[in-house]
Image: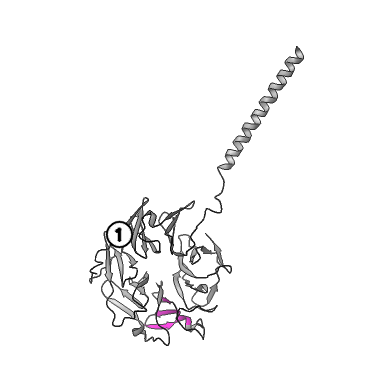
Amino acid sequence: MDKLFKLIYLILILTLNFSCVEKKSSKKEISESEFVSPSKTDTLKFTSGIRSIFQDSKRNYWFGSHQEGVCLFDGKSFEYFTTNEGLSDNQIRSIQEDENGKIWFGTANGVSSYIEKIITNHTPIGYENPQSEWGKADNDLWFNAGNNAGVYRYDGQKLNYFAFPSPKIVNPDNPYFTTSLAEGKSEMLWIGTYAGIFGYNGDQFTVINDETLGLKKETGELHVRSILEDSKGRLWIGNNGIGVLLFDNDTVINFSEKNNLIHPTSARNGDISQQGTLEHIFAIEEDSDGNIWFGDRDTGAWKYDGKTITNYVINKKLKSQMIWDIYEDQNKILLVAMANGGVYQFNGESFDKMF
């Protein structure tokens, strides 16, 4: 009887021990699952190219694509918005934020806004009868107006459409459709179009085109794709063919040509560039150190520090080195938006893939 009692007691002890081991193991598995890192598939999935980058006041990143809408990255996950969610078009050319925290998208077919997960499309006033009397205030948001010779202006209450002053000569093959917008320290609004630049100070216009510059078809004409007024008040104009033009005080030079960055056999049009040239500039940005950055369609990124010019190949494995946008975020990290859909960040010496 004593032996039987001891055997039963031993079985009970072993059962309790195994039960405790299983419970501890279960707790350990649950604890580890709470700290699993995001999978490699949880990343930016655009393939059509990224045309615009913006970081909002909440430090969220917004990426506007060429054909796939816009993506919001909050530091943890990616959320996508397209025409299915209400955008006016899936090509996002610019992204801005107003003083109320609303995010605005300039698309290829109108203007949309986003706040608290609600997307609104805005119908401009004056589209059928464009306003001749322009206006300008500190908190205005400006957008390109698609394939129209004018711009949209949001003044905090309504969206207006303004047509450009009629130029003397119009080339149907190189129209005055807006490609880029920039504001500088001079409070001048610069509007880049294929055929030239309009500068507007709130009172009058400055016009820069082939006629004012004395450019001809034989030597290469304007085909503006990017524009920047830097912290020194200099105006940089990126062209698709004739390189970078620099306006410094009253002097105009072809920056690319002066620095031997236009190939001797270049047709100075939209033809593919040779490596080591700066002929097709789709993005220009100034970083917080005063360096001027250029994004070329064929040859990657270029940095000008005031003395030397350095070329950076973003990734040799990419089929295209084309850069749509260059943006410095709130941490002073320089980002480039690629035509292949990726975003790269500058580490001080080269570019690493961010997304």
Residue 175 rendering spot, x and y as whole percentages: 34, 77
Main SS type for the magenta part? Answer: strand
Callout 1 secondary element: strand
Residue at screen point 25% across, 73% down: 203
Horizontally, residue 111 falls left or right of residue 343, namely left
Task: Tell me where residue 196 sits by quadrant.
Answer: bottom left
Task: Write down the region rendered in magenta.
Answer: 237-256
Residue 339 rendering spot, x and y as whole percentages: 49, 67
Residue 345 rendering spot, x and y as whole percentages: 52, 63
Q: Is residue 259 highlighted in magenta?
A: no
- Mark 1, residue position: 122
Q: Quadrant of the N terminus?
A: top right
Mark 1: give few (<14), some (14-19) or many (20+) Cα within 10 Å.
some
Q: Amino acid at mark 1?
A: His
Task: Tell me where residue 131 sits by quadrant.
Answer: bottom left
Residue 183 visible in the shown view:
no
Q: Is residue 245 highlighted in magenta?
A: yes
